[in-house]
Image (cartoon, rainbow, N blue to C red):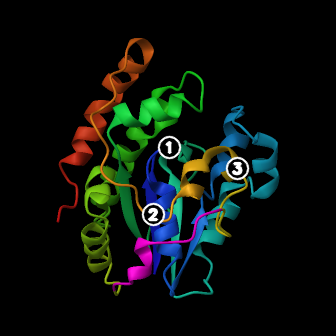
Amino acid sequence: MKIAAWSGPRNISTAMMYAFSNRRDCTGVDEPFYAAYLDATGLEHPMRDAILASQPQDPAQVIANLKAPDASPHVYHKHMAQHMIPQVPRDWFDGFRHLILIRHPARVVASFSAKFDDPTLADIGFTQQAELFQQLTDDGHEPLVVDSVDLRRNPEAMLRRICEAFCLSWDSAMLQWEPGPKSVDGVWASHWYDSAHKSTGFAGPEGNLPVLAGRQADLVAQALPYYERLFDHRLVT
């Protein structure tokens, strides 16, 4: 089985990749369209040159790699929804199971702004997630929507539900992993994955939503309708 997981930045997407790749029957793939996205947009992200050198920049080659046979029975592709710009085709989703991982935009904006200056709505993935959800639903792919707050509140219950929905056997190895860098990490991990590399499992429930002001508050207001639309379809225990 090939699982395409669609997240925005500063979610628990890396932890989810670690959980699935820690299964005995699954491997992980980290943000395979990142180099293609940077090449097409010209955006100056941290470690841009290293990222461009580490992955194919042609979306067609990335898609061919994703569709190629895998060495393990299952593979978990961690995608960033904001990488799905118009230059990246969306006609390859057949044969994949799809998961959309959401997080409240106030938490995303607060966390992402600490690592990336002046993000825009296009940078944080909510519009693209809503578009992907609509396309996948219209095409009969029945994407799972998982909110990080539910997963962090009860990781085992939510992971069991995800496995059940994907007809995967339960593997308790998904709940705990060794700290430090992983073989599945993208080259950008040294900039973005400091917290993930300190983790040995999913973090506990988060506190109150951060209170933001100015441009950050405006960005949350722009993203909120897309988040709420997806939240209404989320998987619950």
Say what amino acid the circle numbered 1 marks: Pro
**In the foreground, 146 or 157:** 157
Tell me the kind of residue under disc 2.
Met
Q: Is residue 31 above or below residue 10?
A: below
Q: Are marks 2 and 1 in contact (CB under 8 Å)?
A: no
Amino acid type, callout 3: Ser
Of 209 and 146, nearer the camera is: 209
Magenta stretch, main secondary structure, is: loop
Q: Taking 210 as reference, is 164 above or below it?
A: below
Disc number placed over residue 16 in the picture, else none: 2
x, y percentage for residue 212?
37, 20
Quadrant of the image occupied by residue 198: bottom right
Q: Mark 1 highlights which residue?
A: 9
* Residue 2 placement, left or right of 61: left
Locate the C terminus and report the quarter of the image it occupies: bottom left
Q: Is residue 15 above or below residue 206?
A: below
The residue indicated by pointer 3 is 190
| Residue 218, magenta (yes or no) | no
Residue at 53% across, 26% down: 119
Q: Position of residue 127 (x, y in %)?
A: 39, 38
Q: Are marks 2 and 3 in contact (CB under 8 Å)?
A: no
Sequence-wise, the earlier of marks 3 and 1 is: 1
